[in-house]
Image (spheres, grey):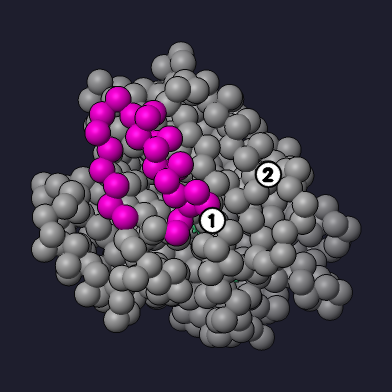
Amino acid sequence: MTAVEINFDGLVGPTHNYAGLSEGNLASERNRDMVSRPRAAALQGLAKMRRLMELGLVQGVLPPHERPEIRWLRSLGFAGTDAQVWEAVWRTDERLARAAIAASAMWTANWATISPSADTDGGKLHITPANLTTMLHRALEAETSGRALRRIFPFAAHHAPLIGQASFSDEGAANHMRLCAEHGAPGVEIFVYGRRASDPPLPGFPARQTLEACQAIARLHRLDPKRTCFIRQSRKAIDAGAFHNDVVAVSCERTLFHHAEAFEDRDAALKEIRAACDFEPEFVEVPSAAVPLGDAVSSYLFNSQLVKTGHGLTLIAPTETRENNRTAPYVNQMLAGGGPIGKVEHVEVRESMRNGGGPACLRLRVVVSDEERRAIPEGFVLTEARIVALEAWVSAHYRETLAPADLADPNLVGETQRALDALTKILPLGDDFYPFQRG
Ligand code: SUG
């Protein structure tokens, strides 16, 4: 079966800000209360999408969610007009207000876990939105993500998010990798978890993904157990700031590019993965001596996108990897070494990086057959004209800056609603996609 991998990038929303909401995400903690630049953030994201299209790749886009999340605040008892709700929550509980305005849905690698139809019994694409239960601000995302994914992939088997309880904490594709001989062939799906539900509470940063969540998704997606691996992420990586596996590993087709300390039991993990493959996998392992975990996390080397281009595999890396004195020489040496990764392209997504979101966090990968691709409503797959329209939309509606004190501004509510309403005329979302449109 011929198939193509489409990267669906999240459009950065108008309320992009630095609220320091994610414990264990060092960038989010460090940059708390910095002044953000929503317009620049969204334009950086669109520039990355354009760059990937220029490389010959198919590029999709996913919409921002409605923020502030007034409907959620109403469910907590805040009342009045939308602007009054917003004023009241700031007077009452700043923590709730900050969660309600986070633009974190931009990191679409956390929207869902997706299994291509070549991997599943029954031959359907399967989608499970992530419940994102570990962080309050992210737990608000699942419903809207699921709604968008149902519109974009009408042919898929859509599952409900797993129960929102700590035993089933799930962060979606950020902890899920796939190896295959080629995109359309049956692949090996690799689920990476940070803890078991039965583990005693662990000191250190939170492990956001449980083994039980991974197992449930593999069952729901009707994966072949012989081609499914469950690998434990190393405690050391989590404590170094790798709050998702995609901060220390990324895969494309036969290649797994990973840090030597990504997995708790490295030898057993690689052996298990190799045994599940009916082709020869290529492990590109980066030793700690070349790139210590701390540099992997601060540069986001592994949060690059690994994509198939005319040059074999290309690493779409954040510009921060060029500025780090361990990753810059390592990448040059890797390219000279003649391995499967033949090229590196740098992209500037600094506004997102400051919240711990690199190039790979900003995209959700979906492998689709030719027939499935034709069933995706036109408009979610980008053309140059649509990128230009989105850029104009951003320039018309987004603020240049958002300082912490600006977040409480009641005008922000109507402003973002008007922006999102206009977006539903550019992307085929319909006029009832956002909660405020449904009244
Ligand atoms: O969940 N940051 C996100 C970053 C997600 C990155 N995604 C992947 N690795 N795939 C998170 O920690 C910070 C928001 C703030 O602090 O304002 C935040 O949610």
Q: What residue is at 73 percent from the left and 43 percent from the top?
A: 197
Where in the figure is residue 148, as x and y percent of width and height?
A: 52, 41
User: What is the x, y in percent for residue 391?
Assistant: 34, 65
Instruction: Write down the region rendered in magenta.
Output: 261-285
The disc placed on residue 234 is 1
Q: Look at the picture and state if 246 lies above or below 99.
A: above
Identify the mark at residue 196; answer none if there is no mark. Answer: 2
Q: Is residue 242 magenta?
A: no
* Mark closer to the chain start, 2 or 1: 2
Q: Residue furthest top?
A: 122
Taking the image as shown, residue 4 lies to the left or right of residue 241, namely left
Q: Is residue 77 visible?
A: yes
Q: Does the residue labelled 1 lie within 8 Å of ligand 1?
A: no
User: Is residue 398 depicted above or below 130 in this figure?
Assistant: below
Occupied quadrant, residue 82: bottom right
Q: Is residue 413 visible?
A: no
Check if residue 279 falls in the magenta segment: yes
Which amino acid, mark 1? Ser
> Residue placed at 55% from the left, 29% from the top?
218
Distance between the alpha carbons at the discs numbered 2 and 1 = 13 Å
Q: Is mark 2 within 8 Å of ligand 1?
A: no
How many neighbours does mark 2 have within 10 angstroms: few (below 14), some (14-19), or many (20 or more)?
Answer: some
Of 392 and 149, the residue lying toward us: 149
Q: What element carries label 1?
A: loop
